[in-house]
Image: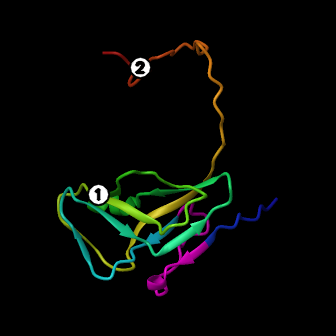
Amino acid sequence: MITLPKRCLLERTPDAKDLPIPTRQTKQAAGVDLYAKISEAVTMQKGECVLIPTGIKIALPFGYEAQIRSRSGLALNHGVVVLNSPGTIDPDYRGEIKVLLINHGMENFTINRGDRIAQMVFAKVEMMTFNEVDTLPETQRDSGGFGSTGIKQ
């Protein structure tokens, strides 16, 4: 059975009409690439964070989010990743999508207009409400936190 894709409304900012809309590089790719909407090249110093605009705004259906994630090639080859990965775009946000990048690489890295800087993946989100109780049910793990299920040495 073939399921038709959900629709996401997209608006380009006036200064981004020359850039591609988010694009899948293969038919089965989970993410779409986001492109840098900058007027001139931006060189990221080692350890530097930059906020790069994409020139797009979206309207998601209720119950969905868009996750902004690193591109694996940029991470592997240059150490450039999305700092707050995954970043979340909520369905009620209507502003321009911007990507917070950090250069963890060993060298400076230059971003040019139209470069693919991140990917966006859509995910269904369950809406929860809270039911306050005096005590939570116990589990085998209980309050064991970081590393509590690993092998102890």
Q: Residue 152: give x, y in percent of width and height.
A: 35, 16
Left or right: where 151 falls relative to 94: left
Q: Secondary structure at mark 2?
A: loop
Residue name at image x 53 percent, y 79 percent: 12
Question: From the image, which quarter does the C terminus lie in?
Answer: top left
Magenta highlight on residue 121: no
Q: Is residue 38 above or below residue 4?
A: below
Pick the front one: 100 or 149: 100
Pick the front one: 19 or 93: 93
Left or right: where 100 falls relative to 57: left
Instruction: Tell me the residue that label 2 is attached to.
Output: 148
In which image quadrant can residue 47 be found? bottom left
Q: Which residues lie in the magenta part?
A: 10-31
The residue under label 2 is which amino acid type?
Ser
Residue name at image x 53 percent, y 70 percent: 57
Residue name at image x 61 percent, y 64 percent: 28
> What count of labels does the image hold?
2
The residue under label 1 is which amino acid type?
Ile
Closer to the chain start, of discs 2 and 1, is 1
Q: Residue 55: give x, y in percent of width and height.
A: 46, 75
Residue name at image x 39 percent, y 25 percent: 146
Magenta stretch, main secondary structure class: loop
Q: Secondary structure at mark 1?
A: strand
Left or right: where 127 falls relative to 1: left
Of all residues, the one furthest to the bottom in this rendering is 18
Residue 46 in view here: yes
Instruction: Tell me the residue that label 1 is attached to.
Output: 102
| Mark 2 → mark 1, Cα distance in angstroms | 30 Å
Magenta highlight on residue 18: yes
